[in-house]
């Protein structure tokens, strides 16, 4: 268990004993011990942190609150101080939990590139550390292996899964002359790759360095209360010392002078101010967490409320991240799918999985196949019912089969024009039809884009490493105008940094390693899905465990409501403090009235903030449970 959690639990348990015990007249020894445990458990860490800051010439609000809590206890009001200690301990524990959940090791990225590589030279094959590879070395990449270095294919043909770097859901064909990157996954062929970059210049190394810089830099955000805590704390201490020292210099009596200074310290303490901001922000975090939106800390809520620009990844964020058949162009669609599924029965390729799943969805009987052969970068062929069935990429030599559908050239052009990948199915050399395979748009994504546009005043921008046609097709379905495709991870981050230099507050959402720099440089970066990469979770400010597009608009609305409540609370708390302080400075404020007024304002702003836990239920209901909870078939597939 985290030490912050132990401290908070201990402080809360002691408070639960001390407060009722004091009200119900329990033995004094019991309540005193309970109050001591509460103060010690919850106040030790902020006190020590405040003293360390003081050594560096900074007076922060943590130390002032501990002093105020002790002062309250010293004048017979332990409940006031204990409440402040418990709230701060609970806040610290929540922040520690969220940090532990979202911050995984930066070295998680190293899992992308293999630690070793098979180097090929005149002496044969030698396994060496990947970091020892140099420009000009030739490495062997077998089927299913990760490419160990940035380089160029000099022999062989295969497909390369680039999803880890570009987010593109479908593998790309790779042959002689194709550039490949470390961390991408080889398909079914054997490749020889000549290293063209030193390890420090690999794309994957650039991602790690950029995220590391963003992670190590000072926090870009501060809570509103943190921005005023230093001058406020210094002001309270200075005035308290002045109220104690100046009258004594002119011969005032010590006891009434000390009482006046202590009264000022109590009424001017930041209890109500801190409780004005933290409960609504923490309540917003709790409401969001009910439906799977885990935010790292309260600063994320404030930043979300200020968002005026949204950058979205495509694959896995706007789309499901799982390719599926979206179009079938054939005289006999069911028959074509059955033949293709039979030929793809032995394939591990993403296109093959999509075809088999389509046959299952249609509840087709798939015939047996034999003599399966995979041709890397081209497709597969197999014998089905005594006929040779080929499933693969279009070629100029495709010959049309039976009439009744658009010919191969027209069908391929039509399918690819819609942003899908065209897969041609031939029987004994004659084309029988074309399958269109694409990454399907998430249900409700279009309405979510509209809602984000209304909330922020600008339509979200699509930033993707995918090719232009699929990106444009998704954007058209969602009504997005600004589409930037073919981007590497650094390109995405550069776009967001340019917006931030222009004074915009940017929300970014993505799921893959390639999105980590984007999430790291945005004002609010949210990793999408329970399967989000470890690095994107580390780089981001929170995790969306369920349908991200439906969650985001309600999340922004919830954050804005929480900040409105926090600011209203600050006005109330500030007005009460100003009134009590003025009374104490220009008149004689009875200690009982000072404590009562201070305590009342603290309770009022705290309850006002926590009502979001009830009032936020409506917003929580708008955060969807999951896409699986919707009725099957909510997103229809267009058939040709």
Image (tube, rainbow, N blue to C red):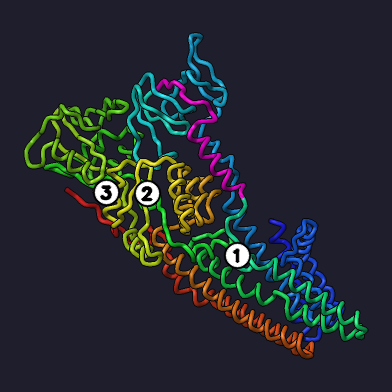
Question: Label 3: which residue?
Answer: 473
The residue located at (82%, 84%) in the rendering is: 260
Q: Nearer the viewer, mark 1 or mark 3?
A: 1
Main SS, magenta residues = helix
4 displayed left or right of 134 = right
State the residue lying farthest toward the top: 122
Residue 629: x and y in percent read: 38, 61
* Residue 517 visible, this angle: yes
Which quarter of the picture shows residue 610? bottom right
Separation of residues labelled 2 and 3 (CA atoms): 11 Å
| Label 1 residue SS | loop
Residues rendered magenta in the picture: 191-217
Residue 452: x and y in percent read: 38, 63
Question: Label 1: which residue?
Answer: 223
Which quarter of the figure is the N terminus placed in? bottom right
Mark earlier in primary sequence (2, 3): 2
Which quarter of the picture shows residue 548? bottom left
Mark earlier in primary sequence (2, 1): 1
Residue 386: x and y in percent read: 18, 27
* Residue 31 visible, this angle: no
Question: Label 2: which residue?
Answer: 314
Is residue 201 on the magenta stretch? yes
Separation of residues labelled 1 and 3 (CA atoms): 40 Å
| Label 2 residue SS | helix
| Label 3 residue SS | helix
10 Å crowding of disc 2: few (<14), some (14-19), many (20+): many
The residue located at (27%, 55%) in the rendering is: 477
Q: Nearer the viewer, mark 2 or mark 1?
A: 1
Separation of residues labelled 2 and 1 (CA atoms): 31 Å
Is residue 323 on the magenta stretch? no
48 displayed left or right of 187 = right
Residue 609: x and y in percent read: 58, 76
């Amino acid at each position: 268990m985290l030490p912050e959690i132990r401290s908070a639990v201990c402080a809360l348990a002691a408070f639960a004993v001390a407060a009722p015990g004091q009200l119900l007249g329990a033995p004094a020894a019991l309540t005193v011990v309970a109050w001591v445990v509460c103060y010690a458990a919850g106040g030790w860490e902020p006190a020590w942190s405040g003293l360390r800051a003081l050594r560096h010439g900074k007076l922060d609000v943590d130390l002032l609150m501990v002093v105020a809590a002790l002062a309250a206890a010293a004048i017979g009001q332990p409940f006031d101080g204990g409440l402040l200690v418990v709230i701060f301990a609970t806040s610290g524990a929540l922040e520690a939990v969220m940090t532990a959940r979202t911050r995984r090791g930066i070295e998680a990225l190293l899992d992308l590139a293999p630690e070793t590589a098979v180097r090929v030279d005149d002496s044969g094959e030698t396994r060496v550390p990947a970091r020892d590879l140099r420009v000009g070395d030739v490495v062997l990449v077998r089927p299913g292996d990760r490419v160990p270095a940035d380089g160029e294919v000099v022999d062989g043909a295969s497909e390369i899964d680039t999803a880890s770097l570009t987010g593109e859901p479908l593998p790309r064909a790779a042959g002689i002359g194709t550039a490949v990157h470390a961390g991408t996954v080889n398909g079914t062929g054997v490749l020889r790759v000549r290293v063209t970059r030193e390890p420090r210049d690999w794309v994957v190394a650039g991602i790690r360095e950029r995220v590391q810089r963003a992670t190590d830099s000072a926090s870009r955000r501060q809570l509103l209360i943190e921005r005023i805590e230093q001058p406020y704390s210094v002001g309270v201490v200075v005035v308290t010392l002045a109220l104690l020292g100046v009258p004594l210099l002119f011969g005032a009596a010590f006891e009434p002078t000390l009482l006046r200074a202590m009264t000022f310290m109590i009424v001017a303490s930041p209890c109500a101010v801190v409780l004005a901001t933290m409960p609504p922000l923490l309540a917003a975090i709790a409401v969001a967490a009910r439906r799977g939106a885990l935010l790292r800390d309260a600063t994320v809520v404030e930043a979300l409320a200020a968002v005026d620009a949204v950058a979205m990844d495509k694959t896995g964020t706007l789309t499901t991240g799982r390719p599926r058949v979206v179009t079938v162009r054939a005289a006999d669609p069911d028959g074509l799918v059955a033949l293709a599924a039979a030929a793809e029965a032995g394939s591990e390729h993403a296109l093959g999985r999509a075809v088999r799943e389509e046959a299952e969805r249609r509840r087709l009987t798939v015939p047996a196949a034999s003599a399966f052969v995979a041709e890397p970068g081209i497709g597969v062929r197999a014998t089905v019912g005594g006929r040779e069935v080929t499933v693969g990429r279009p070629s100029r030599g495709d010959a049309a089969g039976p009439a009744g559908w658009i010919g191969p050239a027209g069908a391929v052009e039509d399918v690819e024009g819609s942003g899908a990948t065209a897969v041609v199915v031939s029987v004994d050399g004659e084309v029988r039809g074309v399958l269109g395979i694409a990454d399907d748009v998430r249900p409700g994504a279009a309405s979510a884009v509209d809602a984000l546009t209304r909330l922020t005043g600008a339509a979200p921008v699509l930033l993707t490493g995918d090719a232009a046609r699929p990106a444009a097709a998704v954007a058209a379905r969602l009504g997005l105008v600004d589409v930037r495709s073919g981007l590497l991870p650094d390109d995405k981050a550069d776009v967001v940094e340019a917006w931030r230099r222009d004074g915009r507050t940017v929300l970014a959402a993505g799921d893959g390693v390639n999105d980590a720099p984007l999430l790291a440089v945005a004002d609010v970066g949210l990793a999408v899905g329970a399967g989000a990469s470890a690095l994107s979770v580390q780089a981001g400010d929170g995790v969306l465990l369920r349908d991200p597009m439906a969650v985001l608009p309600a999340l922004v609305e919830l954050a804005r409501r929480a900040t409105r409540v926090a600011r209203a609370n600050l006005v109330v708390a500030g007005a009460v403090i100003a009134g009590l302080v003025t009374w104490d400075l220009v008149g004689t404020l009875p200690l009982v009235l000072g404590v009562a007024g201070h305590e009342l304002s603290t309770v009022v702003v705290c309850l006002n903030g926590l009502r979001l836990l009830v009032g936020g239920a409506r917003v929580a209901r708008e955060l969807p449970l999951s896409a699986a909870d919707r009725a099957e078939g909510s997103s229809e597939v267009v058939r040709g």
